[in-house]
Image: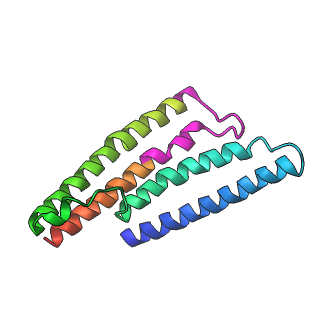
Amino acid sequence: MRKQIDKILGNFLALLMGIMTLDVLWGVFTRYAMGNQSGWSEELARFLLIWIGILGAAYAAGQDMHLSIELLMPKLQKKSQIRLKLLISFLIAAFAFTVMVIGGGRLMYITQVLGQLSPALRVPMAVVYSVAPLSGILVIYYKASDVVTLLQNK
């Protein structure tokens, strides 16, 4: 299942990057060729960049490409390395839960209740902010999968 999620997420990120590229090209074309940039292209590019960045962080967590300093790990014995990896996975999942799932969920809820819409696209901001809890859930899934793998290979 993890490989399927990786493939879907990777393809979705590539699609978002392609759409953002076309959107920015459209914005540049309308600004310089027509003399007036379309009002929505900058906002769409901003929202797509938010989604790419936050979903990309979840993808990076799934590929174990998150920022880390490898000074301590090689000096530890195998058993201690596994314990440290378990601790790191737990801390990342706890961060994702508190900040991304709970915090992002609250942000979504508040903007939904207030009925906040984006200025140009008139999209509910809750839709834009929904990427935070979604990515948090993905990070938690990836880290739980890492824990299961570590415990099985122990």
Towards the viewer: 76 or 113: 76
Is residue 91 found inside the magenta-colored segment of the image?
A: no
Q: Can you give x and y, in whole percent of width and height, for residue 72 in the image?
A: 18, 59
Q: Can you give x and y, in whole percent of width and height, for residue 81 in the image?
A: 15, 63
Q: Which quadrant holds residue 127?
A: top right
**The residue stretch that appears in magenta:** 113-133
- Which of the image's four quarters has the N terminus? bottom left
Asked if one can make out residue 124 in the rendered structure from this viewpoint, the answer is yes
Q: Residue at position x 43%, y 51% from top?
A: 135
- Locate residue 147 relative to residue 26 in the image: left or right: left
Is residue 124 found inside the magenta-colored segment of the image?
A: yes
- Which of the image's four quarters has the C terminus? bottom left
Is residue 9 positioned above or below 137 on the image?
A: below
Residue at the farthest top position: 114
- Locate residue 110 relative to residue 121 in the image: left or right: left
Q: Residue at position x 25%, y 55% from top?
A: 89
Is residue 17 positioned above or below 111 on the image?
A: below
Q: Residue at position x 61%, y 60% from top?
A: 17
Q: Which quadrant holds residue 20?
A: bottom right
Q: Can you give x and y, in whole percent of width and height, for residue 153 in the image?
A: 17, 73
